[in-house]
Amino acid sequence: MMPKVELKSLQYKLLKNLVNKLYDQSRFYRTRMESKGVTPDDIRSLDDMAKLPFMTKKDYRENYPDKIFIAPKEDIVRYHASSGTTGKPTIVGYTRNDIDNWSESLARSITSAGLGKHDVVQVSNTYGLFTGGLGFHYAAERIGAAVVPASTGNTERQVELIQDLGVTAMACTPSYMIHVGEVAEKMGVSLKNDTKLRYGLLGAEPWSDKMRDKIYDSLGVKGINCFGASELSGPLFSECEHQQGIHFWGDFALLEIVDPKTGEPVGAGERGEMVLTMLQKEAFPLIRYRIGDLTVMDEEVCACGRTHPRITRITGRVDDMLIIRGINVFPSQVEYSLNTNPEVGNEFQIVVERKGALDTMMVRVELKPEAFTDNILELNCIRERIAHKLRSLLNVNPVIELVGPGTLPRFEGKAKRVIDRREI
Amino acid sequence: MADDLDRYKIKQLSIFSENRPGRLMDFSKAMGEENINILAFSIAEGAGYGVIRAFVSDPEKALRRLQEHGFVVRYTDVIAIHMADKPGGLYDLTKVLKEAGINIEYAYAYRNEPGAILVIRVEDIERAISTIKASGAKLLDASSFK
């Protein structure tokens, strides 16, 4: 375990290198630093990082697809994409080292949670542009575990694989974990008594200790809270076996907590907005990225002896982002998609509920009087078309409810478009 | 000739009805307050919403009133056919339409002594009117509902 002082000195060295490199090589960062009147010479300690400009999702979107990248194109070995707030996805590129560091970070995380080469890890996150599937896949391979790349869906088959291959850990969202338990039960399989499943590498959506207890009591699975985001690489961090917050490996990420209004650092133990600097990324660097999650940092040495800072559970969002079945959804995306349908007005309302273990999303839209027809089939088509557009943009499957014009609430100030009835 | 056929086009009200309790009540309350008689109606079920279809004693007044109250409503032309109120009555009528290749989009019926009335919505309403008239079946004149 690296002493805290050494960790800080390593972080400073990495930060200094990063700032120098970006100042020399990135027009984006150089312009940003110049507009704040900062040069690399001003960074003389870790605390000086507060002088550096923030970066937000907006910067990332405005520089689509790769204008913030600094690695030469031939050094990029992979791309992933996340959904964007305006309907345009955002792209992350990786060099060979980026993939290595990503795998290393999550490999350390799941090792700290207690996994090793004897484990069989079923990765039930989506494989593809979404970073969850391949992220856990590479990390599990790196620790020498056997990987079952199940991806999402076909839950009965997932249960069979858990049984037949002696799966010991499953990576998915907490709500999907519960769903798998329910499906297993219907198949006459008790995950607790009939399988070797012991760990759930869970994340990508908000969940509570209550859910963790439920998963442990009913499935015999220890739920390990995991954290990441595509901008950072993908899933990177998790709790250790003591489960006292998520460890952020200090040599990969520098964590700050700031007041979301002023951008000033908050006091120790105070809640604020998470700001992340990725210290070793090559293709797509991130300095002081405001990721939007609200949390509390704990810098005390963990019961496991690790000196890396931890975050306690994420308690909310700075913006109005929703997480539905592990997928980020912004009401602005919904609005963007709805606006492409001439049959509906500008008002809409999103209702999120949890049915069984899974989230459901309903979107209420007002039918314009001129779009009304006596023909039920045509109305159903309008509804299906709206749903289809939303589905292909958001990757979640919403139910559309058509309502009469003027029936949805109107707002003078900031619209409250989301009703979240989930009890997490 | 066209004028002759227009007599039989009945202005049915089609009212969009979202999926919540009380929509039929709201509609019937509005009609009651305007002293408009609802002569026949049906409710069609869509995916999470419905369409109330009705013909009433004063369709113009009804449309105005409903629109003022924020209902999404429009006219749809339907025809009302007199059927013999006896076994086979509906068969005789639908056979005529089938033989002429006329597809019924939707229909509803009510009993009206001494006969029964079938209300239908078809794509080519004028051809349906001519066909039915030619078959000898009796069509109800729109003015008969005033």
Image (cartoon, rainbow, N blue to C red):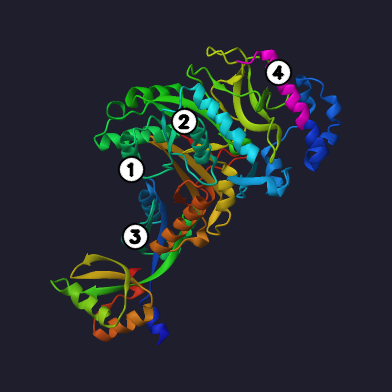
State the CA–CA distance, disc 3 to disc 4: 83 Å
From the viewer's perspective, is residue A26 above or below residue A144? Answer: below
Q: What kind of element bears circle 3?
A: loop
Q: Which mark is residue A354?
A: none
Q: Are marks 2 and 4 in contact (CB under 8 Å)?
A: no
Using the image as rendered, state which of residue A347 and residue B119 is in the foreground.
A347
Q: Position of residue A254 (x, y in %)?
A: 68, 25
Do dots 1 and 4 share one subunit? yes
Do dots 1 and 3 share one subunit? no
Type of residue at label 3?
Asn
Q: Are marks 1 and 3 in contact (CB under 8 Å)?
A: no
From the viewer's perspective, is residue A224 above or below residue A88? Answer: above
Mark 2 or mark 1: whose residue is earlier in sequence:
1
Residue occupying image coordinates x 18% and y 70%: B114
For the residues carrying marks 1 and 3, which lies nearer the camera in this image? 1
The C terminus of chain A appears in which quarter of the rendering?
Answer: top left
From the image, tell me which residue sits under label 1: A157
Mark 2 or mark 4: whose residue is earlier in sequence:
4
Do dots 2 and 4 share one subunit? yes
Extent of the magenta region: A1-18
Chain letter of mark 4 equals A
State the CA–CA distance, disc 2 to disc 1: 20 Å
Type of residue at label 1?
Arg
Residue occupying image coordinates x 49% and y 37%: A137
State the CA–CA distance, disc 1 to disc 3: 60 Å
Q: Are marks 2 and 1 in contact (CB under 8 Å)?
A: no
Do dots 3 and 2 share one subunit? no
